[in-house]
Image: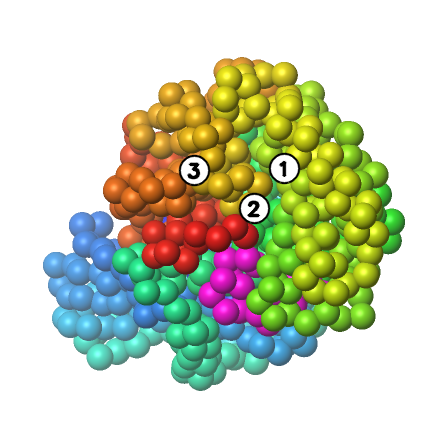
Amino acid sequence: MVTLIEDLALLSNCRTAALVSREGDVEWLCLPRLDSPSVFAALLGDADAGVWRLRPADAAARVERHYDGDTFILVTRWETATGVAEVHDFMPVGLDQRAAIDRTDLVRRVIGVSGTVDFDVDLRLRFDYARALPWVRQTGRTGTPELIAMAGPDAVVLRGVRLHAEGHRHHARVRVDAGERIELALTWFPSFRPVPDALDTDAALGSTRTWWQAWADRIEHGGSHSAEVVRSLLVLRALTNHDTGGIAAAATTSLPEDFGGVRNWDYRFVWLRDAALTLEALLEHGFLRLAEHWRTWLLRAVAGDPADLQIMYGLAGERNLPEHELPQLPGYADSRPVRVGNGAALQYQADVVGEVIVTLSAGRQAGLTESSFSWPLEKQLVRYAAAQFDRPDNGIWEIRGEPQHFTHSRVMMWATFDRAVRAVEEHGLDGPVRHWRALRQRARDEIDAHGVANGHFVQYYGTEEVDASLLLLPQVGYCAPDDPRMLATVARIEQTLIRDGLVLRYRTGSGVDGLPGGDHPFLACSFWLVEQYATSGRTQDAEALMQRLCSFANDVGLLSEEYDPVGNRQVGNFPQAFSHLALVRAADALAGVGHRPR
């Protein structure tokens, strides 16, 4: 049976992430990094693609779950006919970069609450996206059993219970009584290194709880959606690599936009746009140090000729992200192909430089001091944007059809030169400000002439279609939220892009994206509409839509990329940074924080 996306919960150590189902299955885990090959990939196939199951033997057991406060420690409570028990799942947050190279841990602690509960443990280890069946051996002593599995460069050791082999799986049944505790700890390590020592799980749990809670306690939000804002900012932190500063778009690959279709992409990389927007959400809530960390990541990633700028990079700034298919994995709900890597990395998307420059400008406004390289880097990016001024692009939605002059991209080109001018005029930095002013005006004149039809902004020059990215124009200060052209654009979006009260990115039937099939309403777009409503006086509409969108989050507050309002289920890669950062902006707008442009 296919696990519903909304039935997944995230565990994170800020380097990689595990997804655990309501049934107690770890169905997705890549080690040691988020974009490493998987050890458990049942989410994109079945149990034979790798899974770690831990649940009561009682098939009728009732389950509920929650995070332990503002952390990613997952508490799953099981009630059976014979007793009650909890499973506490977590990945220790280790701040020592050297230690992270040597090991990554996932702990599953079973605690008896009342009566007696029997648990089944089923472990199926499949390295390298289920292409490598590991060599497994039992070690340890009677009281301290160990199972070691290795294949190629990877190895894991499982401690805590004695497992028994049956074919290519290992299983056990364990009993926990009230007040008793059973601990299972899986540790990844490089196969060419010695087996790591057993983890001090009590200390690891305590330090992990303290770290997450202390981070969350810094968040201030006085609006009516503060719980959703806190959880969303925590998701953004979980997707930010603790060592490199790279911010992944999501924790998964190939969760489909169209069930059974081909729109299945790898989101475990750093999109400059998504990362920039994420940093702005974090800056708005006081996390200036993370912005500095990401700016340093950016310098490393884009080093060299600006003409070689990519729209996305690996978590450490890697450029080579070749897209290929994994035929051994049948895909989520038979959605083929499963892809790793992302060919869109080689696209030209004209908005990306603007997103980066706007975010760096916001950092400057927030008090981020210039370093010896920061402003020279920005000037290089502005120079690159100027050189590409007339070039059509693939747009924010990574259209795989013919490049166009997308209006949103052109506005972000305008924003590039606008922020460059302001850096000189307001902050005293050096640069060819007359030239930048001229380019800013040229961009505005062009957009006003060709990016508007019948009184509303258009998707790209020469069409009367609209797309949801036009909702972002007021956010960067190109126009006011109540500009007549903007209000007409909103009306047109409401007429043509609303499905069951939610916003589509664009009309796939127009053929602009060059792909078969369709997709579902994009959650970020609907949050953008909330912000537009809130900042243009439609407060009741904004609050009503916000309430509905927040209701789509699962029982632990997580959102995917899209939502199917007919099937009432989440769709696409999960959890999605874009959805969560858009939620934060929408909540800020409703609380009166977001009335100024980015």
The image quadrant where one finds the N terminus is top left
Secondary element under disc 3, as helix, strand or loop, is loop
**Residue 139's x, y, as percent?**
54, 72
Of 98 and 163, the residue lying toward us:
98
Per the image, the residue denoted by label 3 is: 482
| Residue 229 vertical placement versus 193 (above, below) | above
Residue 476: mark: 2
Gap in Å between the C-alphas at discs 1 and 3?
A: 17 Å
Q: Is residue 49 left or right of residue 325?
A: left
Q: Which residues are magenta?
A: 279-296
Tell me if mark 1 has few (under 14), some (14-19) or many (20+) residues whose alpha carbon lies within 10 angstroms of its own: many
Of 540 and 268, the residue lying toward us:
540
Tell me, yes or no, if residue 198 can be seen here.
yes
Gap in Å between the C-alphas at discs 2 and 1?
A: 8 Å
Is residue 289 magenta-colored?
yes
**Residue 93's x, y, as percent?**
51, 73
Q: Is residue 131 left or right of residue 223?
A: right
Residues marked 2 and 1 touching at CB (< 8 Å): yes
Foreground mark, 1 or 3?
Answer: 3
Tell me, yes or no, if residue 33 can be seen here.
no
**Residue 414's x, y, as percent?**
67, 40
Residue at (72%, 52%) from the top-left corner? 421
> What's the residue type where badge 1 is placed?
Val
